[in-house]
Image (cartoon, rainbow, N blue to C red):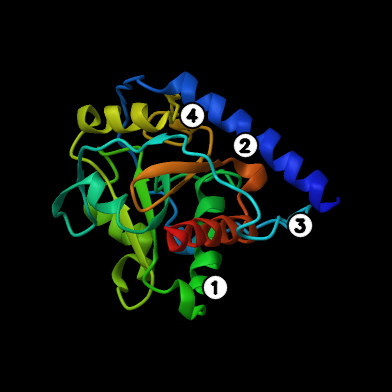
Amino acid sequence: MSGASARAGCVRGRSLARRGVAAGRGVLLALVLAAGPPGMAAASATSSVPPLGFTPPAPGSYRLERIMKAPDGVVLDSDASVHRLSEFTTGKVTLFSFIYTYCSDPKGCPLAYATLHELKNTIERTPALRGKVRFVSMSFDPEYDTPVAMRSYGGQEARDRRGLDWHFLTTRNGRELAPLLGGFGQDVSVAAPKAPGTRIPVLSHMLKVYLLDPRGEVREIYSTSYLHPAVLLGDIRTLLMEQGRR
């Protein structure tokens, strides 16, 4: 695929994702979640990043539009400390996604984790990017995904503060989570467990990863088709170049 065709494909695909966000904005969701056994930790999730079918445009050769302001609310970090979400969505370029720790869909949360893990390694090897980017993974399920569960899910990524900051957040309850889901336009539905005493599958959602600028504005939304380290890295560089021109 040529560079021009790839760029057009990106615009079409990303526009669809944006329309999905607009449709879902303001919707408050009450999550009714059944108790059950723990799911697979992120560190042991078997998911790989598929190859990219096009060459992304060069960083800085395009503009990322301002889509919406990220919502704010009360959240819990993986050490159980209470914060405002805005502490994790402003001040740096941020990649933000909603996940749940027992997700087993290879094209869902495990793919997001694998993609960000690969990108994290690249960023940490790039001196010009160090200290300028953070990742945030936030749970759909505050009842099961407690701070302890999120810390376990994040593994070393949640504990190591020597490199890129990667925060694994949750909320105290579904009531505090709902306006954050609505503000991001992230849709999620509750599915009945397969059998009594099990919780898989419980949640159904479209995978979305959000790119935020240091002002906390969403500048891009990635669906599965465009969730690739090379695409994300190019967009991060584009935002940083934009900041440098101010």
Instruction: Kindly state the secondary structure of the residue where label 2 is placed.
Output: helix
- Give the residue pinned by disc 1: 122
- Give the residue pinned by disc 4: 194
- Give the residue pinned by disc 3: 55
Q: Are marks 3 and 2 in contact (CB under 8 Å)?
A: no
Q: Residues within 10 Å of mark 3 (few under 14, many from 20)?
A: some
Above or below, comparing residue 56 to residue 17 in the picture: below
Mark 3 or 2 closer to N-term? 2
Residue 199 sits in quarter: top left
Residue 77 image offset from top left, x and y in percent: 22, 54
Mark 4 or 3 closer to N-term? 3
* Residue at image point 73% right, 55% down: 52
Q: Nearer the viewer, residue 131 or 199?
A: 131
The C terminus, quarter of image: bottom left
Q: Nearer the viewer, residue 46 or 5?
A: 5
Between the residue at mark 4 and the residue at mark 3, the CA separation in whole angstroms equals 41 Å
- Give the residue pinned by disc 2: 14
Q: Is 18 left, or right, of 10 in this rendering?
A: left
Residue 141 image offset from top left, x and y in percent: 32, 38
